[in-house]
Image (cartoon, rainbow, N blue to C red):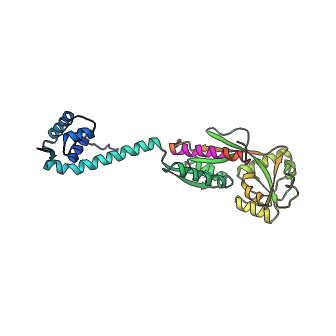
Amino acid sequence: MHKPKATDFALDIAADLQKWRSFVAIGELGSLTRAALFLDSNQSFLSRQVNALERECGSRLFNRTGRGVELSETGQRLFPQVKELLERAQALEHGIRADLREPVGTVTLGSLPSIGTILIGRLFAEVRARHAGVSLKVLEGSSGQVEEWLTDDRVDIAILYRYGPTLPEQEQALATVDSYLIGPAGDRLTAAGSVPFANLNGLPFILPGAPNGLRTALDAGARLARIALAPVIEADSLPLQKQLTAQERLYTVLPLHAVWQEVQEGKLQAARIVEPPFQRTVAMAFAKAKGPSRAVTAVAGHLVRIVGEMAQQGMWRS
């Protein structure tokens, strides 16, 4: 079996970059005095550094002249290589410090279409304006797909709906969302603004197929209420659910934010489900194996703030 080997860097002469920084400054300025002023040092200290370098190199690096110093033949040959080394070291230091100050990297977000549609635009605008080093990658899918992506660490952050009073470990509740019975324009049942859960009995529904978080919760609620929920068509596509509800005069169950625009435009109607209320939690989950990086933490912070602002607009309760 092949054993990994560490790279053996033999550094002696090049180990102290500060001495070579002095070498470059003296070579560029042609004077120990001017170099000492530039480096905020003193001439005798720089002279000792040059003498030490010359001993280590086994060759003279500078020739003394009446006007100061100039690079020797060896010094001229080494000068561009040393300057390039220092430039690379400086770039590395700037990069390290930038990573410590500002988040960088790609953050992959997995979301359901019904919530991603209204969140991602605002999230992208905020991240783009405030974190130049952070880019977003967005995956949209059903609740089962998003769960799978989260388990397989294909996403850094998942935005999910959760049903019931408790959340899985390591998930953060962002908002509480009421569920609404969505009907076509002019529908009498949804015109009242609220509808008891029992009144969903026998309606011509378009609903997602199992396994699906919403469908599982609806079926469980129907069993408790002893009513029948028998969809005439199953579809996981949010656009198709809204389209067929409007065109074929069907019903579906969605949060208000998923049909916000269509309700405002009069294409659909929404009545809050009551007696009992049928609620879901918008939850944010992180990939367990990766752990939040600075970029992931920054994006999560923006998500929390955006959700809070939308709660103030009446879209849900924070």
Task: Write the residue at 77% across / 57% down.
Answer: 263
Query: Residue 124 location, x and y as percent?
Result: 58, 53
222 relative to 245, above or below: above
Give the extent of the magenta segment. Answer: 295-307
In this picture, residue 197 sits left or right of residue 21? right
Give the position of the C terminus as an image quadrant: top right
In this picture, residue 93 sits left or right of residue 187? left
Magenta portion: prevailing SS class: helix
190 relative to 277, above or below: below
The answer to which of 228 and 245 lies nearer the viewer is: 245
In this picture, residue 19 sits left or right of residue 121? left
Query: Residue 313 location, x and y as percent?
Result: 72, 48
In this picture, residue 1 sits left or right of residue 310? left
Task: Write the residue at 86% across / 61% down.
Answer: 186
Q: Is residue 131 visible?
A: yes
Task: Write the residue at 16% across / 42% down.
Answer: 57
Q: Is residue 146 magenta?
A: no
> Which corner quadrant of the image does residue 261 belong to?
bottom right
Query: Residue 44 location, x and y as percent?
Result: 19, 33
The answer to which of 33 and 119 lies nearer the viewer is: 33
